[in-house]
């Protein structure tokens, strides 16, 4: 037995915790490591102690049948670290190499922040596109699709108000141009940038749901999320992403992540400071 609850004196076995982890894995692709299971255990204990669930069986039933319980668990388990212009070399490549080429070829460009967390990544992509268009003195239609499995982070993303941590690498001229300083010192993303981004509550391993993204994506950022998946979920997410990409579209992963050997139909392109994948 792992532990016992103060209030309900409930004991949860490793086996039961494994069963619950499997339900979460099946629905999200999230592969729970030891530290995640500890977090999950604490959450279940707390909710049982508060009387939210009558028993562990009741919790498991709710987890399988009630989306709101499942979503609450996602909120507890996911790691949402992000900030504007994270991995600067990726944004340099987008700005200097990829967007100018795309703008030459097409009138309408679609970008995707897959696992967008609190919105800094898709807003950084939109700002980069606006900057490129201004520099080239051109007007194109740019849409940014952004999805995440956690409703909690998407709420923050929709609000688009950020503190000093999130904006610490935003150059002062960009801050002035695309953010509105709030009376409390925080920064709100400008309506122009916000209007370019559409947020969706969606798991990267949800086969039917991923079709809602549309299979006309030109650039995907799917960074710092596959590290939390096991091999099978990585393969699944990558193949659903690949399906949504146009031929010749680019895929950026986090520096600790790789698509090598996981799916076919992606070739590696070496840009200054980063490896990027391109759909064949
Ligand atoms: C560490 S953040 C990365 C945010 C951003 N991509 C970046 O690199 O700054 C990982 C995000 O992945 C999300 N996530 C985890 N599993 C997911 C899944 N199956 N589908 C969609 N998003 C998921 C989490 O909720 C979290 O917001």
Image (spheres, helix red, strand yellow):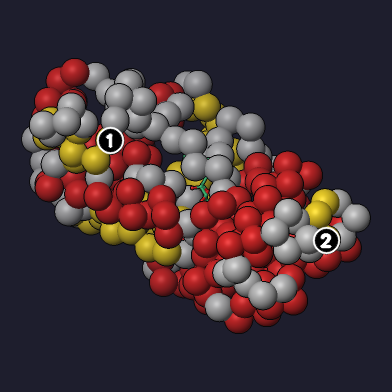
Along the polypeptide, which appears first: circle 2 or circle 1?
A: 2
For the question of whether residue 16 can be seen, the reply is yes
Image quadrant in which you'd find residue 73: bottom right
Left or right: residue 173 compared with residue 110: left
* Residue 254 position within the rendered picture, expressed as x and y whole percent measured from the top left: 55, 36
**In the image shown, does 20 or 268 lie closer to the viewer?**
20
Residue at mark 2: 11
Q: Is residue 54 above or below residue 20?
A: below
Q: Is residue 18 above or below residue 60?
A: above
Total numbered labels placed on residues in the image: 2
Residue in the picture at 34% in, 30% down: 166
Determine whether the residue tagged by mark 1 lies in a helix, strand or loop: strand
Residue in the picture at 90% in, 55% down: 1
Q: Is residue 219 above or below residue 22?
A: above
Residue at the top extreme, as displayed: 172
Residue in the picture at 50% in, 59% down: 149
* Residue 126 position within the rendered picture, expressed as x and y whole percent measured from the top left: 26, 43
* Residue 206 position within the rendered picture, expressed as x and y whole percent measured from the top left: 56, 69
Residue in the picture at 34% in, 39% down: 120
Residue at mark 1: 162
For the question of whether residue 60 can be seen, the reply is no
Image quadrant in which you'd find residue 131: top left
């Amino acid at each position: 037995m792992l532990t016992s609850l103060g209030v309900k004196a409930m004991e949860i076995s490793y086996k039961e915790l494994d069963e619950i982890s499997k339900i979460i894995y099946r629905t999200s692709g999230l592969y729970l490591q030891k530290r995640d299971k500890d977090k999950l255990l604490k959450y279940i204990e707390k909710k049982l102690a508060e009387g939210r669930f009558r028993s562990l069986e009741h919790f498991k039933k709710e987890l399988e049948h009630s989306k709101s319980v499942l979503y609450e668990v996602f909120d507890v388990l996911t790691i949402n670290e992000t900030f504007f212009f994270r991995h600067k070399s990726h944004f340099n490549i987008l700005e200097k190499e990829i967007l100018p080429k795309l703008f030459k070829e097409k009138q309408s460009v679609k970008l995707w922040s897959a696992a967008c967390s609190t919105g800094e990544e898709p807003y950084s992509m939109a700002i980069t596109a606006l900057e490129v268009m201004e520099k080239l003195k051109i007007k194109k239609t740019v849409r940014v699709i952004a999805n995440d499995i956690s409703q909690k982070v998407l709420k923050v993303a929709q609000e688009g108000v950020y503190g000093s941590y999130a904006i610490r690498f935003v150059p002062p001229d960009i801050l002035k141009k695309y953010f509105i300083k709030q009376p409390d010192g925080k920064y709100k993303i400008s309506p122009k940038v916000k209007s370019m981004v559409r947020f969706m509550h969606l798991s990267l391993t949800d086969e039917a749901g991923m079709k809602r993204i549309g299979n006309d994506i030109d650039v995907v950022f799917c960074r710092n999320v596959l590290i939390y998946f096991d091999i099978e979920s990585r393969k699944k997410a990558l193949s659903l992403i690949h399906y949504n990409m146009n031929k010749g579209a680019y895929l950026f992963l986090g520096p600790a992540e790789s698509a090598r050997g996981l799916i076919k139909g992606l070739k590696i392109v070496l840009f200054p400071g980063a490896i990027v994948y391109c759909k064949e």
